[in-house]
Structure formats: C-alpha cells, structure tokens
Image (spheres, coloured by chain):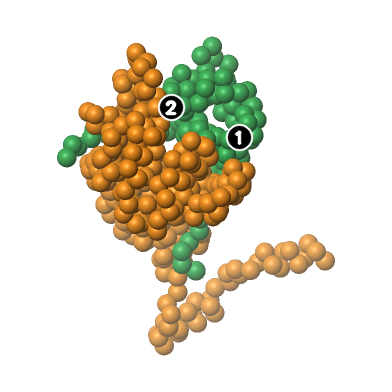
Amino acid sequence: MKYKDYYQILGVARDASHDDIKKSYRKLAHQYHPDVSKDPAGEEKFKEIAEAYETLKSPEKRAAYDQLGAHRPGEDFRPPPDWEQQHGGAQFSFEDLDLADLFAGLAAQRHGAGGRARPLRMAGQDFEASVQISLEQAFHGTEVELQLGMPELDAQGRLHRVAHTLKVRIPKGATDRQRLRLRGKGGKGLNGGRDGDLWLTIILHPHPLFRVSGHDLYLDLPLAPWEAVLGTSVEVPTPGGAVQLKVPPNTAAGSRMRLAGRGLPRPAGDPGDLYALVQITVPATSGDRERKLYEQLAAGSDFDPRANFAREKRSGD
Amino acid sequence: MATEKDGVWVTESEEYSFAELVAVSGLPEAQLRELVEYGALRPANAEAASPTFGGQCLLSVRAAHRIQGSFELEPHGLALVISLLERIRELEARLAHLHAQQPRRS
C-alpha cells in the first residue's frame, strides 16, 4: 500500500488542532473545489484534499492514521501488526488497497459490527468523468472507452479498488459541456442498495472551421470584394457534407447567412442551424492589372462607404 | 469488456419529479424543499399539483450535495451558492455564444 501524507496534503503540522485542520481544508476547498474552481487540475487536487480531511476530521480515524506512522509520500508500507484488529476487527489484503479505501473499509465494518441483524443498505457511489470528442464524433455519435477505478467489496467484505474498462456509446445529440447520465454504471450498491450512476461531461475539441454555441455552429465565410458585390454561389462545408450556398448581390461584411438544420443534431427535435458569417477579404498584394481595374472602379463609382460620418457631422452642427 | 447501452442526455426538455431530484441528490427531502422555497431550484411548472424540474435542476442538486458535503453550508447559504452558480453557468453560455459569433479572421 502506498503512503499518503494527509497532513502534508492539507498543509498542516502533524500536531495541528482540529480547528487548524478545518481552517486549512476550507481554504484549499475554496481554491480547488470542482464546482467553483477553474483550475483544470482542481478536481484531482480536491479529491486528495477531501480524502485527507475525511480522515483527519474524525478523532478515531486520525488516531488510526497516526498509528500507521510517518512515511514518505508514495512509499510502500504495511500497517503495524494488529493495527487492523484494533481499528476494524477484520483482515485486510493490503497489496492492492488504496489508503482511502482502507479507511472507508474500516467505517463500513464498524457499521457491520455489533451483531446487528440487518446489514446497512447503501447506494453505490456516483462517478463523474469527462471525455473529449471531436465535432464530427458529436455529429455522428461515437463510442469511447473509459478507465475507471471503482472500490468494491469482495465476498469476504474486504474493500478493493477494481479497474473497470467501460465502452460507452455516445449517441447523437452532444454539444460542448453536455451531460450524459448512465444509470447504474457507477459504484456497486451494498446489501441491496441501488448501483450508482456514471455522469459523463462531453467536451468538444475546438474545430478549425466551426465554432459551437449550443447546437448551432458558426463558420467564417470569406468572400472576394467582387463576389460580395456581384453575388455568387459557393461551396460551404458542414459536418454533414458540403452544400452550395447562394450569396445574393451586394452582401455586406458581417452578414449572417443561416443554413437551417445544418448544425449539430439535438437529443430531441430539430437539429441546430449553421450560420455563415460573411467576411470580405482583399488580396495581400495586387498586380498592375488589378490595380488598374480598381482605379477604374474608384473613378466610376459614386459609392460613399462613410456617408454616415457626414450625416452625423451635419446633425451635430 | 461490456458495451454499455446509450445513456440519457440531461436536457431542459426532460422532466424530473421532485422524488427523482431527492433520489439523485442524496440530500434530505426537507432540504431540497428549502432550495425550492428559496428559489435556487425553479420548477418548470410551479403551478402544477406535482411540479416537475428540468435537467439543469438535476445537475444543480448534485452540485448542492457536493458543495454541502465539502463546505458544511447551512440551507440558506447553500441556496445562495446554487443560485450564483446557475447565474455563472448562464453567463458562461452567453459568453460562449458571443465568442462563437466573433469572426476568427480580421
């Protein structure tokens, strides 16, 4: 079993008071709690902090932990002889045991001790996981494999962390931060309690072309100045395949053209839309012939792109 | 290796009963009633005899359970935190929507 230094994790001395431990825990929880922290590593860090506090806040568990002795974090160790009998009355197999599971096991066995006729019914633990998929996978639906370590009691009532590989089908309907609930795929319930659920958060990889808002997609549509003025028909990529889009004459930069139903599929109802945002782009350099044509255009056009400046000036006078 | 069947998307169009919220949250029923009373959980149909809740409420009660366990908050404080987290979520969605509409190229 690997040693974890719960005092070091909470940043307190081994002889810290209960109040100091609580204060330090709260400070760290504010910093790393997954519901309030933006730190991507916050969730893992918070699990460590919560595990340490769960043991050190209880005088009984803290005494049991202290009797394990001080070791280097990560060092393999075994509890002193008779430690498990003193604190739980059961034999543990320490080789594949996590320190958190050891203390959870002690609590479960204390519940079972005392000759009560009916063992406690406990619901299985819910699990949270996130998975990154591409926009194309969200569009078509996909399958992902998840590696989860779940604590389970064996036939002798001993707690072990068991590695599970789950192949999960992600149906169409995903968008960024969408949640998928898999009933009964979390930790196993005890003594007839229901199995926990697995809650998946879907994260979409950024796409080089499409930006996502809910189930709608946004795509920049660059047009040459003459295409915007004369109108054109352009091939536009969509997740379901390219489509032809008719651009009407005199289309202004910033115009938004809607392709209904070409966004991401929704779990129920019509799919989202795709919006093409018109941008008018100019070449980085122009040749002599192009320059001459633009000069002819400039001389022959009475278009004033800043007419509103003059109007505003007149109204202010 | 087992292949799992499809999960269920958590969406606002799904409706959940109060009893389902209690089962999912792990919080006592009385405490969830307080969250409704304080406005942290808003039923989709408040006037109905048996109000139902959208998917976001399902996620909020799970967050409530985690936060209460971690910070040992009293019900009124918990309701405030849940309401503020919901506002942050709405603002983040609004921000993502605005970012999506911003052209990448200048």
Chain identifier, orange in the render: A
Q: Sequence-wise, which precedes: disc 1 or disc 2?
A: 2
Q: Which residue is mark 1?
A: B73
Q: Is residue B40 left or right of residue A113?
A: right
At x 32% / y 26%, what residue is drawn? A189
Q: Report the quarter where the C terminus of chain A lies.
A: bottom right
Give the chain letter at badge 2: B
The color chain B is rendered in? green
Relative to B43, does residue A202 appear above or below in the rendering? below
Q: Which residue is mark 2?
A: B24
- Which residue, as the protein is rendered here, is positioned at the far left? B1
Image spot of residue B90 (x, y percent): 55, 42
Q: Is residue B22 left or right of residue A84?
A: right
Relative to A195, does residue A312 appear above or below in the rendering? below
At x 77% / y 65%, what residue is drawn? A314
Q: Secondary structure at mark 2?
A: helix
At x 22% / y 28%, what residue is drawn? A155
Give the chain letter at badge 1: B
Amino acid type, label 2: Val
Query: What is the crowding at mark 2: few (fewer than 14 residues within 10 Å), some, or many (at least 20)?
Result: some
Relative to B89, does residue B29 appear above or below in the rendering? above
The image quarter containing residue A276 is bottom left
Which label lies toward us, 1 or 2?
1
Q: Nearer the viewer, residue A156 or B2?
A: A156
Image spot of residue A166 (x, y percent): 24, 41
At x 32% / y 25%, what residue is drawn? A190
- Which residue, as the protein is rendered here, is positioned at the far bottom? A288
Query: What is the crowding at mark 1: few (fewer than 14 residues within 10 Å), some, or many (at least 20)?
Result: some
Q: Nearer the viewer, residue A115 or A125?
A: A115
Relative to B36, does residue A198 appear above or below in the rendering? below
Q: Secondary structure at mark 1?
A: loop
Q: Nearer the viewer, residue A282 or A142?
A: A142
